[in-house]
């Protein structure tokens, strides 16, 4: 009886939720999208928020109601930066100074050896040190008596000098042509399997990248080969912009039709390299419509609370020249008791999108609004129903006890009569 009473009391105190699906009669033409997204490997000066919908409306580099906050990585932690100002907000005279502040450039042309060679002639005892100092080094292993080496020497120097003028996406990339005298450093050359002169080999740091170069020995061919090695190296670098990140916070007003807003690497004053764009990001918050008051949200089931912002706190990583795409189906929800305060739930599907060579990747948030709306009603037990159930419980329990008592009483009488006959 006590157990049944406890179950009835719990049913009375705990309302249940009933979901009703009907056509959405929300007459609003627009809705706000609120977001807080951290681009893990994209500086704020190259971060653009664009908006597109099926009405044909397209807005590039939206700045109103959006704040970009500079951040940077240090020892695996994302540290706060200052509020970013777009370059179009700077005065013209500030523009050059701004560029100098935000990006340091390695002057490879100024790096020469003691004799003024752009192809550094490296002493044997400093070979490892020079390799560690450079990200990539293209080394000519030669012997002074070798006739082919003598023919290559001026071509090698011309290629090195021209190469130092080349620009690459990563401005702080330290790359260099070099030369090593194998007659003076025979053991070192043997270590790297040099068996003929000249032998040309690329080093990534201190690691040799075999096989040896066996192409034409013209300045253009040597430059093009090393340039391809550098570009290949850049595509696998973990962070193109030297640990810069950008937190994008704000809101957009969008039409209630299918569309998308996306974040991409774009700049009015730069030509972006599509293959170098890294659109990895973390969604700190993303929701449609106004925030749900805690008093309202507490009435929702845990799963429904999650569906109001299912991407919050999730990170989406990708390789260079690809980007995560999020497909969002948005549904209007009404909670019984709050008819004038609709909120929105959404489901999400996420995938990595690969792009063509000349396409700039975009971190897309594609949204579509469901024509159906959900009404959530709280079903509670009325006090008179609880009282009726309680009385029924008491009456039923009493009746059952009486039946059991009568059964055992009758059974006892039968047993006593049987024992009397036996005597």
Image (cartoon, rainbow, N blue to C red):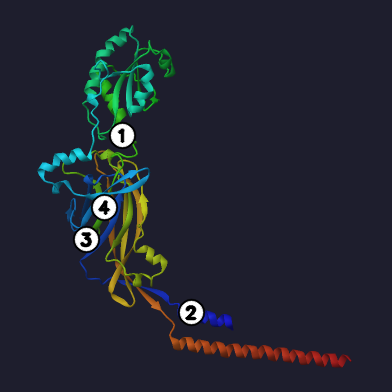
Vertical position of residue 383 compared to residue 202: above or below: below
In primary-sequence order, the first of circles 3 and 4 is 4
Is 116 on the left or on the right of 190, as rendered? left
> Label 3, on which residue?
254
In primary-sequence order, the first of circles 2 and 3 is 2
Determine the CA span between mark 3 and mark 1: 37 Å
What percent of the width, then of the height, locates residue 251? Answer: 23, 59
In primary-sequence order, the first of circles 3 and 1 is 1
Mark nearest the camera among 3 and 1 is 1
Q: In this rendering, does residue 92 appear at all?
A: yes
In primary-sequence order, the first of circles 2 and 4 is 2
Check whether the beta carbons of the residues at disc 2 and disc 4 lie within 8 A of each other.
no
> Label 4, on which residue?
248
Quarter assignment of residue 157 = top left
Quarter assignment of residue 192 = top left
> Label 1, on which residue?
234
Determine the CA span between mark 2 and mark 3: 43 Å
**Callout 4: helix, strand or loop?**
strand
In the image, 187 versus 223, the foreground residue is: 187
Mark nearest the camera among 2 and 3 is 2
**Callout 2: helix, strand or loop?**
helix
Query: Residue farthest to the left?
Result: 92
Circle 3 Cα neighbour tier, 10 Å, few/some/many (<14 / 14–19 / ≥20): many
In primary-sequence order, the first of circles 1 and 4 is 1
> Label 2, on which residue?
11
**Callout 1: helix, strand or loop?**
helix
Quarter assignment of residue 232 = top left
Q: Residue at x 56, y 89 (%)?
A: 394
What percent of the width, then of the height, locates residue 107? Answer: 23, 28
Circle 2 Cα neighbour tier, 10 Å, few/some/many (<14 / 14–19 / ≥20): some
Mark nearest the camera among 2 and 4 is 4
């Amino acid at each position: 009886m006590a157990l049944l009473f406890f179950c009835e009391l719990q049913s009375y105190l705990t309302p249940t939720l009933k979901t009703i699906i009907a056509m959405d009669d929300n007459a609003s033409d627009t809705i706000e999208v609120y977001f807080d997204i951290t681009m893990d490997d994209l500086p704020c000066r190259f971060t653009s928020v664009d908006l597109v919908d099926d009405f044909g409306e397209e807005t590039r580099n939206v700045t109103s109601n959006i704040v970009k906050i500079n951040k940077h990585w240090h020892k695996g932690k994302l540290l706060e930066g200052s509020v970013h100002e777009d370059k179009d907000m700077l005065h013209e005279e500030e523009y050059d100074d701004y560029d100098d502040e935000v990006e340091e450039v390695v002057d490879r042309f100024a790096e020469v050896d003691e004799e003024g060679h752009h192809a550094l002639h490296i002493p044997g005892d400093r070979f490892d040190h020079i390799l560690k100092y450079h990200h990539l080094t293209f080394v000519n292993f030669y012997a002074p008596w070798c006739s082919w080496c003598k023919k290559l020497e001026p071509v090698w120097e011309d290629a090195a000098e021209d190469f130092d003028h080349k620009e690459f996406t990563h401005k702080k990339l330290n790359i260099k042509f070099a030369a090593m005298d194998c007659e003076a450093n025979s053991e070192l050359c043997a270590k790297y399997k040099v068996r003929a002169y000249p032998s040309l080999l690329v080093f990534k740091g201190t690691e040799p990248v075999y096989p040896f170069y066996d192409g034409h020995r013209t300045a253009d061919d040597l430059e093009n080969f090393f340039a391809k090695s550098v570009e290949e190296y850049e595509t696998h670098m973990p962070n193109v912009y030297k640990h810069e990140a950008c937190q994008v916070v704000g809101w957009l007003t969008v039409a209630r039709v299918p569309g998308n807003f996306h974040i991409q690497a774009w700049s009015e004053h730069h030509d972006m390299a599509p293959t170098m764009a890294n659109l990895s990001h973390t969604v700190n918050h993303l929701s449609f419509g106004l925030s749900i008051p805690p008093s309202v949200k507490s009435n929702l089931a845990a799963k429904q609370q999650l569906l109001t912002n299912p991407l919050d706190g999730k990170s989406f990583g990708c390789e260079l020249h690809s980007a995560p795409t999020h497909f969002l189906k948005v549904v209007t929800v009404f909670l019984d008791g709050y008819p004038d305060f609709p909120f929105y739930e959404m489901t999400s599907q996420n995938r990595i999108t690969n792009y063509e060579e000349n396409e700039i990747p975009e971190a897309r948030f594609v949204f579509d609004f469901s024509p159906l709306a959900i009404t959530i009603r709280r079903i509670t037990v009325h006090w008179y129903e609880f009282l009726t159930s309680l009385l029924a419980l008491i009456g039923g329990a009493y009746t059952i006890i009486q039946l059991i008592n009568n059964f055992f009483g009758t059974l006892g009488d039968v047993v006593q009569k049987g024992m009397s006959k036996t005597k």
